[in-house]
């Protein structure tokens, strides 16, 4: 069953804040080993980084929104301590552990990355419900255009808000979105203490098996 982002009968909210960058930001000369400085992180607020996308992907992974570290580097799930890339490898999607700056190699594996909300914030809880619901509508249009087989949203709380599914839990969903099957993954942020690394990797593995 397909559904409307924000829930059935959802009203269109006031337009949320829009990000302000059109190309990956450049790190300042003070950056060490590719790590952004405090000034880089401050400058990255509200920035937008490009998706890693193509038509007909096997799985399109979807974060909540970029953090400042990701926005400063131009790479998804880039902050040290984020467990997305280790879980992707341990779950069997990649044969080796990729670095965030190797994200474009996912396309050869029919994998991609996008976000529910585009603009970067220090914390995901800086996004309000209207912004998440609008992001859900934009995501639905993107899925309709690209036609991935699976959409995997990494963050159950954001999924509940963006798509009006208050009772949703981690795992496969009965609903479909614009022809794509849906899977909700745990938020891989290192701040998510509810999911230990082994359990997170096991959930990625469940998705891999289902998507083969």
Image: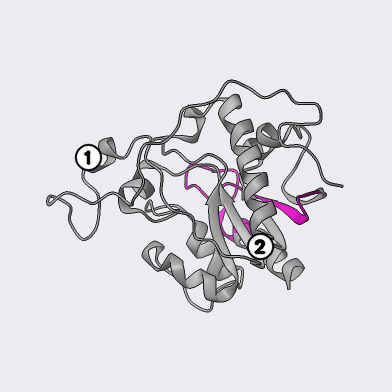
Residue at 41% across, 39% down: 120
Position of 185 with respect to 181 (left or right) is: left
SS for callout 1: helix
What is the quadrant of residue 7 in the picture? top right
SS for callout 2: helix
Magenta stretch: residue 141 in it?
no
Q: Position of residue 75 (x, y in %)?
A: 39, 56
Residue at 49% across, 55% down: 51
Most extreme residue toward the right, as rendered? 1
- Could one spot residue 195 in this view of the protein? yes
Magenta stretch: residue 178 in it?
yes
Most extreme residue toward the front, as rendered? 145
Specify few, some or many for label 2: CA neighbours under 10 Å numbering under 14, 14-19, or 20 or more.
Answer: some
Gap between marks 1 and 2 measured at Cα: 35 Å
- Could one spot residue 152 in this view of the protein? no
Residue that mark 2 sits on: 202
Position of 67 with respect to 4 (left or right) is: left
Q: Position of residue 59 (x, y in %)?
A: 65, 63
| Residues shaded magenta | 176-200
Between 24 and 190, the one nearer to me in the picture: 24
Most extreme residue toward the left, as rendered? 29
Q: Closer to us: mark 1 or mark 2?
A: 1
Q: Earlier in the sequence, mark 1 or mark 2?
A: 1
Residue that mark 1 sits on: 38
Q: Position of residue 152 (x, y in %)?
A: 66, 54
The circle drawn on residue 2 is none
Residue at 73% across, 73% down: 212
């Amino acid at each position: 069953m397909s559904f409307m982002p924000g829930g059935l009968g959802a009203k269109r909210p006031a337009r949320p804040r829009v990000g302000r960058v059109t190309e990956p930001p450049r790190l300042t000369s003070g950056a060490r080993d590719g790590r952004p400085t405090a000034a880089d992180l401050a400058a990255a607020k509200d920035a937008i980084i490009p998706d890693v996308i193509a038509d007909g992907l096997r799985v399109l992974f979807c974060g909540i929104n970029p953090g400042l570290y990701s926005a400063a580097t131009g790479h998804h799930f880039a902050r040290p301590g984020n467990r997305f890339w280790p879980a992707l490898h341990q779950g069997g999607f990649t044969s080796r552990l990729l670095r965030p700056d190797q994200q474009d190699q996912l396309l050869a594996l029919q994998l991609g990355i996008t976000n529910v909300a585009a603009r970067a914030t220090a914390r995901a809880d800086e996004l309000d419900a209207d912004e998440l619901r609008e992001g859900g509508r934009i995501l639905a249009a993107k899925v309709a255009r690209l036609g991935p087989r699976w959409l995997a949203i990494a963050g159950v709380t954001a999924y509940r808000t963006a798509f009006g599914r208050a009772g949703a839990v981690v795992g496969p969903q009965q609903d479909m979105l614009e022809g794509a099957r849906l899977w909700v993954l745990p938020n891989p942020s290192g701040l998510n203490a509810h999911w230990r690394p082994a359990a997170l990797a096991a959930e990625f593995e469940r998705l891999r098996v289902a998507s083969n």
